[in-house]
Amino acid sequence: MFTSFMFATGIENSDPTINNGRTRIDEMEKCGHYKYWKTDFDLLRDLNIRFLRYGPPLHTTFVGPGRYNWVFPDLTFSELERRDIVPIVDLCHFGVPDWIGNFQNPDFPQLFGSYAEAFARRFPWVQLYTPINEIFVCALFSAYYGWWNEQMKTDKAFVTALRHLAKANVLAMESILKVRPDAIFVQSESSEYFHAENPSAIKPAEIMNSRRFLSLDLNYGRRVDSEMYEYLMDNGMTREQYHFFLERSSLRHHCIMGNDYYMTNEHRVRHDGSTTSAGDVFGYDEITRQYYGRYRLPVMHTETNLMEGPEGNEAVNWLWKQWANVLRVRNNGVPVVGFTWYSLTDQMDWDVALREENNNVTPVGLYDLDRNIRPVGRSYKQLISDWADILPAQSVCLTVPVALPSDCYERPVLRHREQVRQLIENEARPRDDSQQSSH
């Protein structure tokens, strides 16, 4: 019924806008998923993968306040259920519907919370969710770098987008738990590190290394450090808005910390605060231990890839390196519960971070866009075959309470769900002063 390790992949559903909202980059359309979705699900069976990062396109599903177009989600999610594939449902991936506008809209959190609840009621067998993918990256690219959506470039716009995204994520978790109290949230977030290039770059690097934690600090209700508190207050967040997150810290008990790691996640910082890619200096192992030390939550490696290059083995070698890092983290005592090569197929225009619509293939998939397996796909299939039975034997105690769709209404699952519901109700119930402890 329950699983000890989740080998996963994903189907890219990014949908940000560029050109001041005039152009939407719909990766599901560009990668052919709307046409080949059944074939894509067949590929999962060929790889022996049961866990899929996947979600309906938000911009075509959420068509207005309280209005939803479930045609495509009904087709795809009923097929996932039939095939007994466990989706980690990605409800918002870098974009919102035109009628919402962008992430500066203060109505977005409440609207998104209602959408999350409607989805959970429509598909009650779904247990795993990433309500909003990569909050930090989305706010940074949309409101600080000026690349997507609102295309703004200020600290105030960044803090506003970050607050709205984190609040929407929190409200979505609350809404989903009303429907599915044993839901588990895998918050896929980019894990970053900023290296000072010279002594004069130490201060800006320190600020960036504090700022990288803001999305998860808010999401998990962890108090930010004093410098970041001043940064948030100076850029439009109020004390009341900040305390909204602190008051919901118990939601972290339902969370797995999903962290994404790419070759571009480590940065060299110059004296003027500008950055360039540093490559994998520390690597996934060291940076994951930093994040785990801060949040003390179970970990899943939720995204990685590398483009297949001229030698043809670049992605294969990166897969091996990432897996070696996952095993090192796990063997050092961090509860790592899953690994993901992202994505199932090649993507489009990620060589320019979706800033331009060039329709250039980004060859990072387990399969190409003709659905032919790549060398990294064969290697991942072999990796899963080699390790699937070994990892549970290494620690029979490290088990995640995730039920297959076919087990959704089995007695042990229902019993567990009721126990979690009671725990949630107890957490929400006010305690007498006599029950409070100073420890």
Image (tube, grey):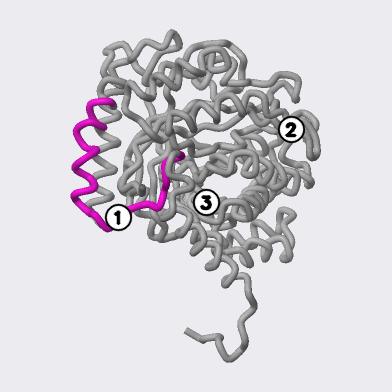
Task: Give me the residue at 59% from left, 39% from top.
Answer: 123
Q: Position of residue 133 (x, y in %)?
A: 55, 39
Question: Relative to 145, is 380 on the left or the right?
Answer: left
Q: Amino acid at mark 3?
A: Ala
In magenta stretch: residue 72:
no
Crowding at label 3, few (<14), some or many (≥20) Cα neighbours within 10 Å? many
Residue 387 locus on image (x, y percent): 21, 37
The tag on residue 183 is 3
- Residue extending farthest to the top is 370
| Residues at marks 2 and 3, CA–CA distance in whole angstroms | 22 Å
Q: Where residue 398 sits in the image (x, y, percent)? A: 30, 55
Tag 1: amino acid: Leu
Q: Residue 397 vs residue 197: left or right?
A: left
Q: Which residue is mark 1?
A: 398
**Figure label count:** 3
Q: Which residues are magenta?
A: 381-405
Mark 2 crowd level (few <14, some 14–19, many ≥20, 10 Å Cα): some
Note whether 279 is above or below 414 in the view shown.
above
Looking at the image, which residue is at 59% across and 59% down?
228
Q: Quadrant of residue 240?
A: bottom right
Left or right, 233 with respect to 423, comes to right
